[in-house]
Image: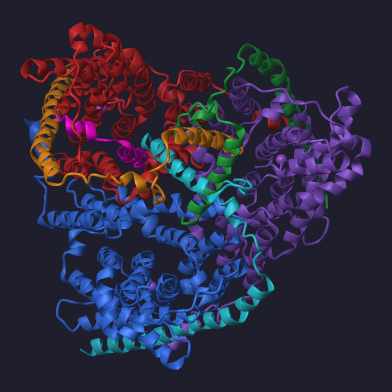
Chain colours: A green, B cyan, C orange, D purple, E blue, F red
Amino acid sequence: MENLQELFIEAGTLMLAGMVFVFAFLGLLIVFINVVLVRLAKKYPDAIVESRATNKRNNKKQEGNAGVSPAVVAAISSAVTQYRQQHSTKK
Amino acid sequence: MENLQELFIEAGTLMLAGMVFVFAFLGLLIVFINVVLVRLAKKYPDAIVESRATNKRNNKKQEGNAGVSPAVVAAISSAVTQYRQQHSTKK
Amino acid sequence: MENLQELFIEAGTLMLAGMVFVFAFLGLLIVFINVVLVRLAKKYPDAIVESRATNKRNNKKQEGNAGVSPAVVAAISSAVTQYRQQHSTKK
Amino acid sequence: MESLKLLWMSTGLANFELGQVIMMLVGCGLLYLAIARNFEPLLLVPMGFGAILTNIPVAGFSEVGGLLHYIYYAGIDTGIFPLLIFMGVGAMTDFGALIANPKTLLLGAAAQFGIFATLFGAIALNAIPGFEFSLKDASAIAIIGGADGPTAIFLASKLAPELLGAIAVAAYSYMALVPIIQPPIMRALTTEDERKIEMAQLRPVTRVEKIIFPLAVLLMTIFFLPAATPLVGMFCLGNLMRECGVVDRLSATAQNELINIVTIFLGLGVGSKLSADKFLNVETLGILALGAVAFSIGTASGVLMAKLMNRLSKEKINPLIGAAGVSAVPMAARVANKVGLEANPHNFLLMHAMGPNVAGVLGSAVAAGILLALVG
Amino acid sequence: MESLKLLWMSTGLANFELGQVIMMLVGCGLLYLAIARNFEPLLLVPMGFGAILTNIPVAGFSEVGGLLHYIYYAGIDTGIFPLLIFMGVGAMTDFGALIANPKTLLLGAAAQFGIFATLFGAIALNAIPGFEFSLKDASAIAIIGGADGPTAIFLASKLAPELLGAIAVAAYSYMALVPIIQPPIMRALTTEDERKIEMAQLRPVTRVEKIIFPLAVLLMTIFFLPAATPLVGMFCLGNLMRECGVVDRLSATAQNELINIVTIFLGLGVGSKLSADKFLNVETLGILALGAVAFSIGTASGVLMAKLMNRLSKEKINPLIGAAGVSAVPMAARVANKVGLEANPHNFLLMHAMGPNVAGVLGSAVAAGILLALVG
Amino acid sequence: MESLKLLWMSTGLANFELGQVIMMLVGCGLLYLAIARNFEPLLLVPMGFGAILTNIPVAGFSEVGGLLHYIYYAGIDTGIFPLLIFMGVGAMTDFGALIANPKTLLLGAAAQFGIFATLFGAIALNAIPGFEFSLKDASAIAIIGGADGPTAIFLASKLAPELLGAIAVAAYSYMALVPIIQPPIMRALTTEDERKIEMAQLRPVTRVEKIIFPLAVLLMTIFFLPAATPLVGMFCLGNLMRECGVVDRLSATAQNELINIVTIFLGLGVGSKLSADKFLNVETLGILALGAVAFSIGTASGVLMAKLMNRLSKEKINPLIGAAGVSAVPMAARVANKVGLEANPHNFLLMHAMGPNVAGVLGSAVAAGILLALVG
Ligand code: NA
Ligand code: NA
Ligand code: NA
């Protein structure tokens, strides 16, 4: 039973040390975000037009899509869904 | 030549045992389908709207596509094909 | 220093042999293209309708897309892009 | 005749042992939970199937020369598969909500109490005859409280490979049970008014912040806890590939095809550890019990931490999002959202809960690192 | 000068042996068949290319340290690649037509007579001086009659690795030749009236049936033929992933990117076995001859079985679909459909032929298991 | 206490060595170049990250049992990863422009002078105390002049693995710097009139030509330089899969998912060679200097060859496209196009520059084969 007591003490120490460490680590991250990242965000704001979505995959080029009414887009979107379903059944 | 004869006998036994086994195995499957699966099919019929095609890949959401005429869909489908071809040449 | 001199001679030989070989090899390819490939091109010209783009990936079938005006296709293409962007954000 | 007898001797029927039958039923049970109940199916389908395969008599799937043997030793014993999964998860993780509201990191930290309390509990179980968990075993079991599958598999493969099967079953089962385990605890520990708290909209986070964040996390891990760098490092690599914007094709592959391929193999490999001699014992019952305790304590700790923070700060947070700190991304965040909507139909907590949710992933990776450093 | 001589000694021209030249021509022949004639190109392109690479003097592709050496020993010697292919094929297989008309399983069973008759034939060839096929060799050769590439490669790698190249060449060549080999046999064994038989439309099969079916197949294999569980198990895993509806992203990867990657490697690895000493001998001629016999007997057996069933049952089936029982999915089913259309332009047999077609896949996996259990 | 001390002893802070800190900064520098400057990000992001991971104290990423150790020995030491990348590059390469204007092969040949001159230069550096490059080392360094990443990694892993890190850094850095290094050289060696030369439109190339071409290249390599067949063979396999039109799904996988997966691993594995003891020495400085020289000489050789050909032939070619002969596909071709447009806004050289550009890939693979044959 002494062995068990020893294990208990070890486990207790682990619990204490572990929780302190986890809080310290994530707490430091809070400081980092508040001090460093917030400043970086002010210094390097995103460009107005976020163009990352453009080259999501296979570097597809984005076309201008001004002038297309949302209603048309909605209709077409559903058509695309339908098209995809038809064409994915074969796979 | 005795060795060959032995081999022949072994091969013949294999042929017999193999064909019996294959028929028994697949025959049992017939029984299983007729007895178990057919009952399962009655007990758990498919939901009327088969919705599996929806989450085919990347869990894309299905939009309602009611109210879009098949003609429009056909036109759009071909446009989509065209679009894809143009955009797959670069790859 | 003698060792260095030896190395120099070896390196020089390598340089010479290497460049001669590279030119000979790629030169032979020129001959091959001019003699063999050019004749092959005349003997086996491509079919008029190059249909390879069709089965680029997953053997999708190409629909006839005659009768759809380019303007419609352009509008639709941009709608498709828009659709894709909306649906790729979730990923 | 000889041939027929040989054929019969080679059938499964002539060679079955009871334990194998039971384990195959366990495998079928996992498949049932995955397919009919939608319990974490991406891992439980291959894992349940692997459990069936590994228990087939004669076939020798997990013996030298068998498929599952190769998969286990190439990918799980080395730690490669969980690390690649973690890279993919990193590529799928958006730290935006966390960066916008960094206080939620404290919720993710608090929820890790589920891990360390369970470690204590596992040692306590040794008081009952039949249990003899070493500190390594206890650590591997405790990580179930991290509610993070690849982390649990990685740690268990390093500290207690013979418990890997049971630990993985427990971890994924409870992750799937999050919508059932958490809400009662959340309701019991909060008042109606607390659940109604609406939170301010999050500020937009810039691209530069999102690029620097994974590098900063890695740097801190390097400084303070190198033992956690395999997990945190691969996670941050995935996240950096996602956010940096110049390797989108690598990021897309990491979060689609690569993670899919590895998931199939990981599931099969983990399933191969579900053999009768390693699973059908009282320790497995202990692990399942401890897992439930771990999830409950983690959930409670997160909620209570949120209430404590509300005492100390003017800017109130809805304590429900504290429960998301156990990770189980994105299920726990959705649960927080759902319980919140019950109290206040206009209160959308999903985005706010994503902060503690991804903080929980970091938190349990850090906890795993601590256990590796001190016990491993 | 020294350097130039060294360069010359390192050229292929100075080191060629006749056998290597011939085998490279064989490789070119395979490429020609694949590209110009569309003979099973997915495997024959990498396989033909592998045959060329492995026969390059000096380069050592298949020696220790060479690329093909690694590929062969990591993926084919272990059986991993054919099993992964089989998983992908499972994920691509729809058992609907089979479940709707289970009698067609008998056609798939009958067609396996091609395998066992060929086994007998291979032993008979030993009467001719120059042939010395052991029972293992004969079994590996006979499986060509199964008309299933991965099954043939898997079995050959276990029973007769030195014949693997010739067996794979024969298996894939005859699979590609199905539209030429089968129709004359089908026409010779059926009357015009039989070919005109129209079959009733198949009943719809429910999702639950499709989910239970692969599990039942696996269970029966476990009970009666554990030796077949690697093949059948991976096939059923793929099929379960396809049908269960909760792991679609894993299923999609298994039947696309994963199977593509493995196919490239499998082809290269099999091609690496096409070396002169293993291919350029009288045994290869025997294997090619036996393969043709196996396909013909399998086709005939399937057709005759269908005719027998028509004698015994009121519900008539078109005997042409019996030929699809050799598997060679989906080519054999298309051939049955085409020959049927010639006799009756309104008779679409494709869906009906898919039943025996996929039954043939199961049948030859079972046959492979029997051979492994009794001979392996 | 004991526990806290153990925790401290396991931190990175307690174990850092200066060299590791510097190498991690090098890794961060590579990430900066990749992300902020778009320097070959697909390789430099994983490589920079790998450089950070490998230098973490205690974590043991590159020691036995570590992730990077497995990646390096399974994929780079064996040569498998660079060869698979080369297959993917082959599947992405269109030889149309080259076949339409075969003379451009001479430009690709001339640009390889950068390699062999640098070999001489590396030996010359031995005259300076501190440098002791063997002929193998010099060859591995010289291949940087080939401006082809996988070729450089493959050759370095065979001839001088301890220099691999520095060579890869130099190769990819200079490839990214092509738009800065090349234009001044191109302008200095050409007159305004030469840069204005417009070239005739290229003839269309048929499908049959494109299918035969990779096979012919392979055949010639087999005859004359078997040592180059691993590189050239896999490249031609990829190209054949692209052009043959019957294995499009394999080709698509080779140029997308497979190359993406391998790129992540290749980058990490190469990064693992960026350890302080192998990188922080005077030899690395020498390698970086020689790399710049190699690129410059290669560029100049290509341009001068074009001018020479204009002397001898009536059909003029724009000497700017000679610079594309160093390969660095497709960057060098774009640079030629851009410099050409500056001189003549109606002069689009891109397609014409693709000829020498892909010729340069072949040329440097051939050069690598020569070095392997004579020095390896
Ligand atoms: Na967690
Ligand atoms: Na078959
Ligand atoms: Na080059």
Quadrant that contains the C terminus of chain D: top right
User: Is residue E21 or residue D317 the one in the foreground?
Assistant: D317
Identify which residue is drawn at 88% across, 37% down: D195
* Residue D62 visible, this orientation: no
Magenta region, residue range: F77-102
Q: Is residue E120 magenta?
A: no
User: Is residue E340 or residue E278 the one in the foreground?
Assistant: E340
Query: Which of the 4 image quadrants contains residue B3?
Result: bottom left
User: Compared to F1, does E245 lie above or below?
Assistant: below
Whether residue F219 sits left or right of residue D128 in the image: it is left
Count of all numbered marks drawn on residues in the image? 0
Q: Is residue F100 magenta?
A: yes
Instruction: Please state the horizontal and vertical placement of residue E205, each as a whole percent of the image.
Output: 57, 70
User: Compared to E222, does D30 lie above or below?
Assistant: above
Quadrant that contains the N terminus of chain D: bottom left
* Residue B60 visible, this orientation: yes
Image quadrant, ligand 3: top left
Identify which residue is drawn at 83% across, 43% down: D339
Instruction: Please state the horizontal and vertical placement of residue A45, each as a whole percent of the image.
Output: 62, 15
Whether residue D118 sits left or right of residue E57 in the image: it is right
Magenta segment, principal secondary structure? helix
